[in-house]
């Protein structure tokens, strides 16, 4: 089935993997669906209604805001995984006083749950970029969206895979150093979505560092508030936005390297024919 680049991306946001199936890439479609939906379901199983604790809309509001509760566009970074977010919104219970108290009660392994649901939204964006690329009937030895995904998992890895090893190592090191400094200044407590939800959105773009910090420092307790907590949180968030630049650049490098390779092959073929 013929899809435009825009419709391919839109289909992926609604149902991860749908565009890949329509474009004749069923294996990618299965992997996209399993990764996005599987991560969201696994995280939601841990969090349940606790996931709405990070929502920015005040519970109990009426009018337009009541509809936004069913279309949780403010639930970031899960919102790009739009289908799962909407279904979760439809399953949401009414805001009774007992429920609102429960939302504030921490859950076991909630750091893992927030990590899983948040990662599903980031992956939805990456799969949408992949579908956009495929719909344009372009081919690459390293699909640009995969280069960006590698840089999300391990900052700089996308450049290394695309053939720019030195650049990737420098950019990746800069992101890691910034993120680690944030953890040091905050005594390991900078990555905490339950308390720093808005900052966590920026941190989520650092996939690998976020995964490690969520698993290793997420449940750490402290008796005294770290003196440089705010600085630590800010540095980890800056690292996340730095990695956005790394991911976009990795996408561009993979895209342009294949264009250059294609031009070289074309010129070689023309030289042989002459």
Image (cartoon, helix red, strand yellow):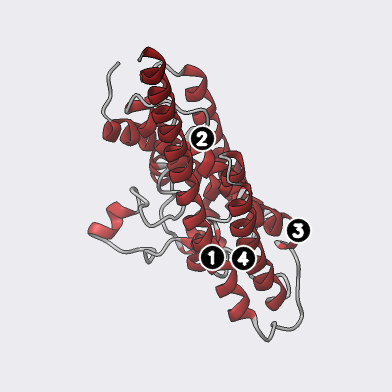
Quarter of the picture holding the C terminus? top left
> Callout 4: 10 Å neighbours few (<14), some, many (20+)?
many
CB-based contact (under 8 Å), mark 3 and mark 1: no
- Return the x and y of residue 3 as percentages of the image width and height: 28, 24
The numbered dot on residue 192 is: 4
- Classify residue 233 as left or right of residue 219: left
Q: Nearer the viewer, residue 131 or 51?
A: 131
- Classify residue 209 as left or right of residue 34: right
> Callout 1: 10 Å neighbours few (<14), some, many (20+)?
few
Residue placed at 55% from the left, 69% from the top?
A: 196
Mark whose residue sits in front, 2 or 3: 3
Q: Nearer the viewer, residue 226 or 107?
A: 226
User: Which residue is outermost to the front?
Assistant: 274
- Return the x and y of residue 260 as percentages of the image width and height: 42, 35
Who comes first in sequence, dot 4 or dot 1? 1
Who comes first in sequence, dot 3 or dot 4? 4
> Callout 3: 10 Å neighbours few (<14), some, many (20+)?
few
Question: Pointer 1: what residue?
Answer: 101
The answer to which quarter of the image holds residue 169 is bottom right
User: Which residue is outermost to the bottom?
Assistant: 227
Who comes first in sequence, dot 2 or dot 3? 2
Question: Pointer 3: what residue?
Answer: 216
């Amino acid at each position: 089935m013929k899809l435009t680049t825009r419709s391919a991306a839109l289909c992926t946001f609604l149902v991860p993997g749908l565009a890949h199936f329509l474009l004749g890439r069923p294996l990618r479609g299965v992997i996209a669906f399993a990764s996005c939906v599987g991560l969201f379901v696994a995280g939601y199983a841990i969090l349940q209604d606790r996931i709405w604790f990070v929502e920015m809309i005040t519970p109990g509001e009426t009018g337009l805001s009541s509809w936004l509760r069913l279309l949780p566009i403010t639930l970031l970074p899960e919102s790009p995984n739009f289908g799962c977010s909407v279904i979760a919104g439809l399953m949401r219970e009414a805001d009774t006083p007992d429920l609102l108290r429960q939302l504030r009660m921490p859950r076991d392994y909630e750091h893992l749950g927030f990590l899983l649901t948040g990662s599903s939204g980031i992956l939805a964006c990456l799969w949408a970029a992949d579908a956009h690329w495929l719909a344009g009937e372009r081919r690459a030895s390293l699909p640009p969206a995969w280069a960006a995904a590698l840089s999300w998992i391990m900052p700089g890895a996308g450049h290394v895979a695309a053939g720019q090893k030195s650049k990737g190592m420098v950019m990746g090191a800069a992101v890691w150093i910034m993120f680690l400094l944030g953890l040091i200044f905050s005594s390991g407590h900078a990555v905490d979505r339950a308390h720093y939800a808005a900052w966590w959105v920026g941190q989520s773009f650092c996939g690998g560092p976020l995964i490690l910090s969520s698993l290793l420092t997420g449940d750490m307790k402290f008796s005294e508030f770290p003196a440089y907590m705010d600085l630590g949180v800010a540095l980890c968030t800056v690292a996340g936005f730095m990695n956005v630049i790394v991911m976009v650049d990795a996408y561009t490098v993979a895209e342009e390297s294949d264009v250059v390779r294609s031009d070289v092959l074309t010129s070689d073929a023309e030289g042989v024919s002459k």
